[in-house]
Image: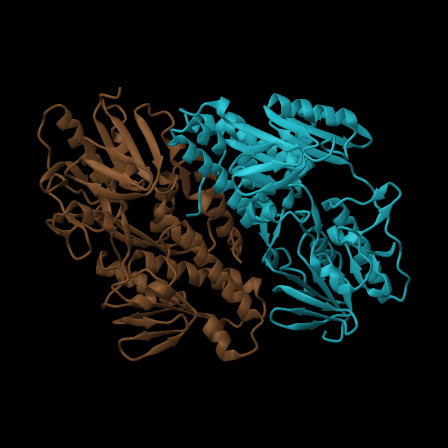
Chain colours: A cyan, B brown
Amino acid sequence: MDKLPHIVIIGAGFGGMETARRLSKAPVRVTLIDRHNYHLFQPLLYQVAIAGLSPEQIAYPIRSIFRRQRNFTFLMDEVTGIEPESRCVTTRHERIEYDYLVLSAGGQTNFYGIRSVEEHALQVKNIVSAVATRNHLLRMFEQASREPDPALRRKLLTFVIVGGGPTGVETAGALAELIRLVLTKDFPTLNLDETRVLLLEANGEIMRAFPESLRKATRDSLHRKHVEVRFGAVVEDYDGQIVRLKSGESIPTLTLIWAAGMRATSLADHLGTKQDGLGRVHVEPTLQAPGHPEIYVIGDGAFVDDEEGPLPMLATVAIQQARAAANNIRRALKGLEAQPFKYRDPGLLATIGRNEAVAHIWGLSFHGFLAWVIWLGLHIVRIIGFRNRLVVLINWAWEYFFYDRAVRLITSD
Amino acid sequence: MDKLPHIVIIGAGFGGMETARRLSKAPVRVTLIDRHNYHLFQPLLYQVAIAGLSPEQIAYPIRSIFRRQRNFTFLMDEVTGIEPESRCVTTRHERIEYDYLVLSAGGQTNFYGIRSVEEHALQVKNIVSAVATRNHLLRMFEQASREPDPALRRKLLTFVIVGGGPTGVETAGALAELIRLVLTKDFPTLNLDETRVLLLEANGEIMRAFPESLRKATRDSLHRKHVEVRFGAVVEDYDGQIVRLKSGESIPTLTLIWAAGMRATSLADHLGTKQDGLGRVHVEPTLQAPGHPEIYVIGDGAFVDDEEGPLPMLATVAIQQARAAANNIRRALKGLEAQPFKYRDPGLLATIGRNEAVAHIWGLSFHGFLAWVIWLGLHIVRIIGFRNRLVVLINWAWEYFFYDRAVRLITSD
């Protein structure tokens, strides 16, 4: 057993999990390393931030998932370095040799160097930050409910979301619904006119990956939900009290949720190969790191230039790359050449709220109730674990029929 | 409306919630103050600590519960003082006048002055401490799984629970099951002989409120689960590494869960009336504070000497006292005299694990499967909210049939 080739996978996101699964029957030892002991279903994390789901419903213990995979070992640890020359990964506690390395360490929030934002903004990046965002949002309403000064109350009830991609749009739509459908009932003295949800987009368009008909549907839908969408709104500074835009405008608010972009984690830097502006490794068409055929880089950390431009940082990309990397490793074990990766676009889906989603799948663009039902179905199916699926379904059905949100708890001090 | 008598209730535990509910139709204004925006179903909190339930399943937003009660206002704030002479409550943010005050601020952990324990022990007292305990327990197993030194591994896998009351017994039983039924599958390399669960009781008996036949059943059941129960084991010191007992014995462990006792919160001190050794107010038989007929003290903070001795700090006591206090306030509004409180003992129930509970109800003592089913049923019924009941039921059914625990997540850094 110890003589079998050792595959080390860094990161238990969509890419890492799929790679480990795809190697389950290969004659190898697989070690998956992650800082957390769970796999997180990131596409629904914004629902934790808006009090719709609890973190436990979208996270699943890694050891549980791989309980039956004999060639699998999980290591909960933080990777501190990669030494490609000696084929070693160093963690906070040990040094691990590999024969093949799959780097699927994901991405981190890109603050574009704006330190004040990094310091004061909320994020929806992991369980801790999503729960912190939920606690903060609910606390703003509790504070506003006992605040006599109207100017201060408006500041407490102004919510700024930065970034017009799917995360920003979904969060803005869901937050607007949380306020109008749920919190107005919780806070009967609340004056809706004092609450504002702003979505700031630096460029001229939101949801750029979608066709124009769906972008328009998204804008219309956000408008109906009273989300103020601002284009060309570039954030320059945020001190926790006032957002300052490049245009000179300033918006007093205690809440800035930053969803303006991602970059690769710094682990990719250890490979010493060419990276793009977001820190992503320029991999070979086979997903191998240049000069290191035993290292595969997949997911948010890999820069792959498709015919239609660089592949986006999406779960579907990471999963397809994982399959390709696992396949190439299995081929290498048999002495076969690595095959180039080809991305098949499965389409795009995003939800803007109750009964409303936009879909660009199977060559079709549509929006509204049908897109929303497809979004619901796909997300329920993709959540790991039957029990999690069931409780998420119950939560969503409850929300839908009773205009309620399950997790309106402030769980920090 | 503003002319109506103002009832201020401090604390949204079982006592405070029941008081507010019982005043729903009275011609009064009710203000409930709590630091948290949720009511916590404390009897199941230990299940959060052993990764069986998520906090969201046993907590419920207060504003949601009282949404239809017209005379009710919730204030999320921390009470900092009570001024009985001027009939005022001060919080961190305001000063609130009352006509009647119901002090139901609950209890806090009693460390009996052992500072080192207070500093290093884990607790199962509120959401934050229960989740911290869960994270810690799971982290011990992750660390042990990569620890080559057998002595260090044993230290990581020794779990000490202090206190032979229901909380300590339930936690010890549930932890032993978590290890034997679940974690051994998660950690296939784990040697069960290296894990120890110890339950330390300072006196000669566990579950003292129960009759001897049930105490014996409890001891036998813990024995079958490999929980080592120690009597006369008095903790003197714990530095986070070694528990030192009065007997001179020392136990190397990184885990000490303190469930050895409760005392009243310090808010009772503001009344300036006689208190017992646990800080509880010696109330009149009517539950009024001596010299202050407009102040009621109920629940863990009240000392009531029944025929069979002082009433224990239990949810059932707090709920019955809440009804009595609300009733006396309604009587006072009509110019009637306050009536003395009489506790009707509804019996005792505690679970030791799968298929096993002890019950002393309806004048009968019994244990085993039937007691366990009654325990399950009663707890499901008492959880607030249909959705919460449903998801807890699903979780428990899942655990029962698949020998699994839902929430094995380490959610801190």
Outermost residue toward the top? B1
| Location of residue A412 with respect to A235 vertically, above or below | below
Provide residue B244's location: percent of width, then percent of height.
Answer: 33, 75
The answer to whether residue B260 shows anywhere in this view is yes
Provide residue A191's location: percent of width, then percent of height.
Answer: 45, 23
Left or right: B300, with A71 as reference point? left
| Location of residue A123 with respect to B335 vertically, above or below | below
- Residue at (56, 44) in percent of width and height: A122
Left or right: A306, with B371 as reference point? right
- Residue at (52, 62) in percent of width and height: B183
Left or right: A96, with A337 as reference point? left
Comparing B91 with B380, the one in front is B91
Provide residue B277's location: percent of width, then percent of height.
Answer: 17, 57
The quarter of the image holding the N terminus of chain B is top left
- Residue at (23, 47) in percent of width and height: B267
Provide residue A127's location: percent of width, then percent of height.
Answer: 56, 49
Comparing A2 with A353, the one in front is A353
The answer to whether residue A402 shows anywhere in this view is no
| Location of residue B143 with respect to B301 vertically, above or below | below
Which quadrant would residue B296 be assigned to in this image?
A: top left
Comparing A218 with B48, the one in front is A218
Which quadrant would residue A309 be assigned to in this image?
A: top right
